[in-house]
C-alpha cells in the first residue's frame, strides 16, 4: 500500500499519478489535498503518519519542487525520503538508501517523466544486507 499527498502546487500531478497507479492496479491512500493554498508540511506529516502506523509501506509526496516535502518527511521517524528528477536517482535511492518516500516536484518534472521516475522507484528492491544495510542503520541511528 502507498500513501500519496500533494500541496496545491502539485494537485494536478497528484491526479495524474493517481490515475497512473489506478492503471497499474497499485493501491494507495490519498492524503490530499485539494485545498489551495495549502501547507506542504501538513500533508507530508499525514503521509508519513500512514507509514508509521503501518497502513502504508511507502509514500509519494508532491509539491512545487519536491524539496519542502522531502525536508519535512525526513524529520519524521522511520522515513527516508528522496527527491528525484530522473529515474537513475530513483532506482539508486531504493537500491542503496532503502528510501521509503519518493518526492517529486510538479514544477520540475512533467507527467511522463514523473511516471518513469515512479516506475524506477517502485520496481527496485533494496540491496539488502552488507554495506548498504550497515550505512542505512548508521543513518537511522541519528534519529535518536
Ligand atoms: C508552494 O508555492 C511551494 O513553495 C511548495 O509547493 C514547494 O515547492 C516547497 O518546497
Image: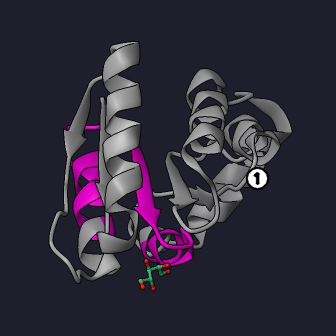
The quarter of the displayed image where residue 75 is located: bottom left
Left or right relative to 137: residue 29: left
8 above or below 126?
below
Question: Relative to the observer, which residue lies in front, 143 or 125?
Answer: 125
Say how the picture is coloured.
Answer: one colour
Task: Please tell me which residue lies in front, 116 or 135.
Answer: 116
Quarter of the picture containing the N terminus is: top left
Rendering quadrant holding ligand 1: bottom left
Seen at 32% across and 78% down, the residue is 41
- Image point (36%, 17%), residue name: 23
What x and y, as percent, mark residue 11? 31, 60
* Percent of width and height locating residue 62: 43, 60
Left or right: where does residue 127 sit relative to residue 75?
Answer: right
Q: Secondary structure at mark 1?
A: helix
* Res 26 seen here: no
Query: Which residue is the extreme one toward the left?
Result: 35
Rendering quarter of residue 125: top right
Give the x, y percent position of residue 92.
Answer: 78, 41
At 59% from the left and 47% from the top, the residue drawn is: 99
Residue 5 visible (yes or no): yes
Residue range (magenta): 44-72
Vertical placement of residue 140 versus 53, above or below = below
Q: How many marks?
A: 1
Graded by Cα atoms within 10 Å as few (under 14), some (14 to 19) or many (20 or more), the crowding at tag 1 reads few
Q: Pointer 1: what residue?
A: 135
Question: Would you place residue 114 above or below residue 25 in this image?
Answer: below
Q: Is residue 99 left or right of residue 58?
A: right
Asked which quadrant contains residue 116, the reply is top right
Looking at the image, which residue is at 39% across and 63% down? 10
56 falls in the magenta region: yes
Amino acid at each position: 500500500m502507498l500513501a500519496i499527498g500533494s500541496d496545491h502546487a502539485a494537485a494536478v500531478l497528484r491526479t495524474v499519478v493517481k490515475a497512473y497507479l489506478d492503471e497499474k492496479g497499485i493501491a494507495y491512500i490519498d492524503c490530499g489535498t485539494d485545498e489551495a493554498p495549502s501547507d506542504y508540511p501538513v500533508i507530508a506529516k499525514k503521509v508519513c503518519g500512514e507509514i508509521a502506523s503501518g497502513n502504508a509501506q511507502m509514500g509519494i509526496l508532491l509539491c512545487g519542487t519536491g524539496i519542502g516535502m522531502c525536508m519535512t518527511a525526513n524529520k519524521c521517524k522511520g522515513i527516508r525520503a528522496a527527491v528525484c528528477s530522473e529515474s537513475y536517482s530513483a532506482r539508486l535511492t531504493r537500491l542503496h538508501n532503502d528510501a521509503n518516500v519518493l518526492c517529486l516536484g510538479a514544477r520540475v518534472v512533467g507527467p511522463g517523466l514523473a511516471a518513469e521516475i515512479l516506475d524506477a522507484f517502485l520496481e527496485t528492491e533494496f540491496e539488502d544486507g552488507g554495506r548498504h544495510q550497515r550505512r542505512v542503520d548508521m543513518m537511522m541511528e541519528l534519529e535518536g
